[in-house]
Amino acid sequence: MSLIYLPNIQGLRAIAVLAVIVFHSYPACLPDGYAGRVRSLLNLIINT
C-alpha cells in the first residue's frame, strides 16, 4: 500500500498542530480537552 500525498489536507494538519500548541501554551483557552477533539475529528476526516 502506497501513501498518497494530498496537499489539501495540509491545511487541516496545520490547524491541528496549532490547536495543540495553543493548548499546551495556554490551557485555559481550550478547556476540557478541546485539542483532543480536534485531533480526533481530523483523524476521522483524513482516514475516510
Image (spheres, grey):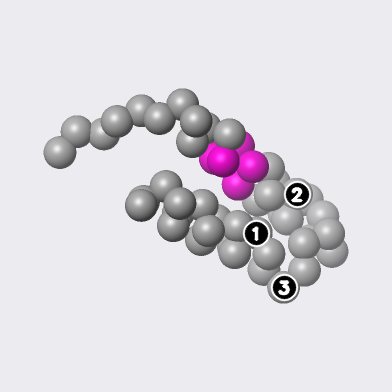
Q: Amino acid at mark 3?
A: Asp
Disc 3 is placed on an element classified as loop
Which residue sits furthest bottom?
Answer: 32
Find the distance from the CA under tag 2 to the CA under tag 3. Answer: 14 Å
Predominant secondary structure, magenta span = helix
Counting residues from the start of the chain, the first of labels 2 and 1 encountered is: 2
Image marks 2 and 1: residues in contact by CB distance under 8 Å: yes
Q: Is residue 7 above or below residue 40?
A: above
Q: Amino acid at mark 2?
A: Val
Q: Position of residue 45 (x, y in %)?
A: 45, 51
Q: Is residue 13 above or below residue 25?
A: above
Q: Residues within 10 Å of mark 3 (few under 14, many from 20)?
A: few
The label shown at residue 35 is: 1
Counting residues from the start of the chain, the first of labels 2 and 3 encountered is: 2
Disc 1 is placed on an element classified as helix
In the rendered image, which residue does mark 2 sit on?
A: 22
Find the distance from the CA under tag 3 to the CA under tag 1. Answer: 9 Å
Q: Residue at x 51, y 61 (%)?
A: 40
Q: Is residue 8 visible?
A: yes
Q: Amino acid at mark 1?
A: Ala
Q: Residue at x 60, y 57 (%)?
A: 38
- Magenta residues span 12-16
Find the distance from the CA under tag 2 to the CA under tag 1. Answer: 9 Å
Task: Decide whether residue 15 is among the magenta residues.
Answer: yes
Q: Residue at x 51, y 52 (%)?
A: 42
In the rendered image, which residue does mark 3 sit on?
A: 32
Question: Viewer-proximal residue, 44 or 14?
Answer: 44
Q: Position of residue 5 (x, y in %)?
A: 36, 28
Q: Residues within 10 Å of mark 2 (few under 14, many from 20)?
A: some
Which residue sits furthest left?
Answer: 1
Question: Viewer-proximal residue, 36 or 47?
Answer: 47
Q: Residue at x 40, y 30 (%)?
A: 6
